Amino acid sequence: MVRVKLLGQLRRVIRARHYSRWTEQAYVWWVRRFVRFHAMRHPADLDEKDVSAFLTHLAVNDRVSAATRNQAASALLFLYEHVVGRRLRIEGVVRAKEPERIPVVLTRAEVRRVLDEMAGVNRLIVQLLWGSGLRLLEALQLRVKDLDLERREIRVRGGKGGRARVTMIAEMLIGPLRAHLERVRRSQKKDRAAGGGGAPLPGAFHRKVPGAVYDWPWQWVFPAARRHVDKRTRAVCRYHRHPSGVQRAVRRAVREAGISKRATCHTFRHSFATHLIEGGYDIRTVQELLGHRDIRTTMIYTHVLNRGGLGVRSPADMP
């Protein structure tokens, strides 16, 4: 009973701070594991030593990665500071050192081979990841009003860390996007005729503008196949597509294309940045398009300057 109450408090605090629902799910999952690890004892009765024991168990017994261990540490630090009301001593909670990794990047030819193995909406989504540098969730959470096809721009709202930015739309995608939006509009009209046709709205916007749930600009660019009833408005809505469907399609396409690299949906965003730098665009431009707060995050893509015709020649290739 205490555990349910604790998790309920945690969810309310996270939502009050407007964290993403993915962060909420991850934090709740780690707190649940932490409580179970300590035989259902309430976190208020535990301290830094107990947190460190749990994190050590993850590293030694479960052999989780440094990034996973640090996510668990962040969840527990948040729990203690904002729910339990006690700040843990940072020195008592040792962070794992994450190794620096060069991102996996596909060549332009490899990207096209993967795309050739895809079809339909999933192919269009992946083309946006590569052509606009979007994260998968940023693409799936696009609404119609976020696309400006005349100016070839996408306004990304609520990206990682809540940051907004503007990025481009590839010229080759303007026609496919127009055709796709027309199909979505026809689908929404059918839903409206059947008593549905809405899209969940952010925050309390449904109270500020009643009926906006059915307005075309607020519809998802990539709506889900299934309908559901929105708990807040009681309107029959469609949520956006779930990322798992696109992820499965990409894994299958990479396998069918015979590519041995460990390519995921995020690889296309890495490839977007790398191909721009290879094309001679400056690092600041790439930073703005990716929405990075720190230029050092973008600098990792300069690894392309160390290979091929743009970089240092190997002594084995010298005459």
Image: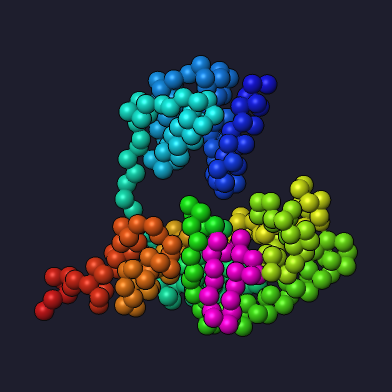
Q: Total of numbered circles in the picture?
A: 0
Image coordinates for residue 83, horizontal then vertical, percent: 54, 29
| Residue at 55 percent of width and 61 percent of height | 157
Magenta-tinted stretch:
139-157
Residue 16 falls in image quadrant = top right
Quadrant position of the N terminus in the picture:
top right
Taking 116 as reference, is 100 left or right? left
Image coordinates for residue 153, horizontal then vertical, percent: 53, 75
| Residue at 35 percent of width and 35 percent of height | 95
| Residue at 40 percent of width and 59 percent of height | 292
- Outermost residue, front side: 208
Taking 178 as reference, is 67 left or right? left
Residue 250 falls in image quadrant = bottom right
| Residue at 58 percent of width and 76 percent of height | 148
Image coordinates for residue 279, horizontal then vertical, percent: 34, 78
Q: Is residue 98 magenta?
A: no
